[in-house]
Amino acid sequence: MININAQTIELYAKQLRLPAFNHYSDAVRQLGSDKSYEEFLLALMKMELDSRMDSSQKRKIRTANFPYMKTIDELDCSRFEHITEAFIHELASCDFVSKRQNIVMIGNPGTGKTHLSIAIGVKACMQDMNVKFYTAANLSNELIEAQEYKKLIKIEKQLSKTDLLIIDELSYLTFNRHQSELLFKVIADRAERRSVVVSTNLKFSDWITMFENTTMVTALIDRLTFRSHVLNMNSDHPYRAEYINKVSDN
């Protein structure tokens, strides 16, 4: 009878899409025999809710397409020369996303821009936000390809619904007028509606080296920096350079 009951519970849990209910024995052990039916039911429901939240967070992290996983805890905040640890944790709260603000990280290579971008993105996923991570080159290529295959409107709609769009490495390539226009539209469409995190090695005055249209550069910077946190992440002792030196010494 016990085995039949267990099989029936498994069947009902599958049909009702309540997989955590299969682990009802865990709730029984945790609660003890002196608890009421209501407490047992609450424990089961909490297990199901926790399971769904965990699955949702993992799904959002996969969908975000991070190149690798990084967390705030892995950051050595003492290495940042112009940003306080308190401010890093304030950004990691993702309150800026709720306020529809942006973050622009400017700094020389190897100073933790990508790490911080990913870590903030992971935090946003953990808060049930929709996140997308791109390098500027990958985003540009995806937009060009989507336009070629007449899927641009679909991609733009998907991006417009993303709570946090992260554009990394906006500095390594020169974009032609067509690429510039597509990138500009994606960012402009998000102005005061959704948040963007951008990382770059170039100060704003040097952005004209990336884009053909200087007027568009001015408009792009204007939209990115309005309601924005601009982080100075330049360092005389970047992480990556120090790591390379250590490897070379060994």
Image: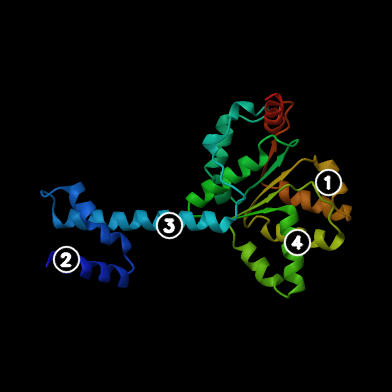
Residue 15 drawn at (x, y percent)? 31, 73
Alpha carbon separation for disc pair 3 and 1: 40 Å
Q: Is residue 9 left or right of residue 71?
A: left
3 or 4: tag closer to the N-terminus: 3
* Amino acid type assigned to the residue bearing label 4 in the image: Asn
Residue bearing the label numbered 2: 3
1 or 2: tag closer to the N-terminus: 2
Residue 57 drawn at (x, y percent)? 47, 54
Quadrant including the C terminus: top right
Q: Secondary structure at mark 1?
A: helix
Numbered disc in front, either 1 or 2: 2
* Amino acid type assigned to the residue bearing label 3 in the image: Ser
Numbered disc in front, either 3 or 1: 3
Residue bearing the label numbered 1: 207
Alpha carbon separation for disc pair 1 and 2: 68 Å
Q: Residue at x 77, y 66 (%)?
A: 144
Residue bearing the label numbered 3: 55
Numbered disc in front, either 4 or 2: 2
Q: Residue at x 73, y 53 (%)?
A: 136
Q: Neighbour class for label 1 at 10 Å: few (<14), some, many (≥20)?
A: many
Quadrant including the N terminus: bottom left
4 or 2: tag closer to the N-terminus: 2
Of 176 and 4, the residue lying toward us? 4
Q: Are marks 4 and 1 in contact (CB under 8 Å)?
A: no
Q: Neighbour class for label 2 at 10 Å: few (<14), some, many (≥20)?
A: few
The image quarter containing residue 185 is: bottom right
Q: Secondary structure at mark 2?
A: helix
163 above or below 144? above
Residue bearing the label numbered 4: 141
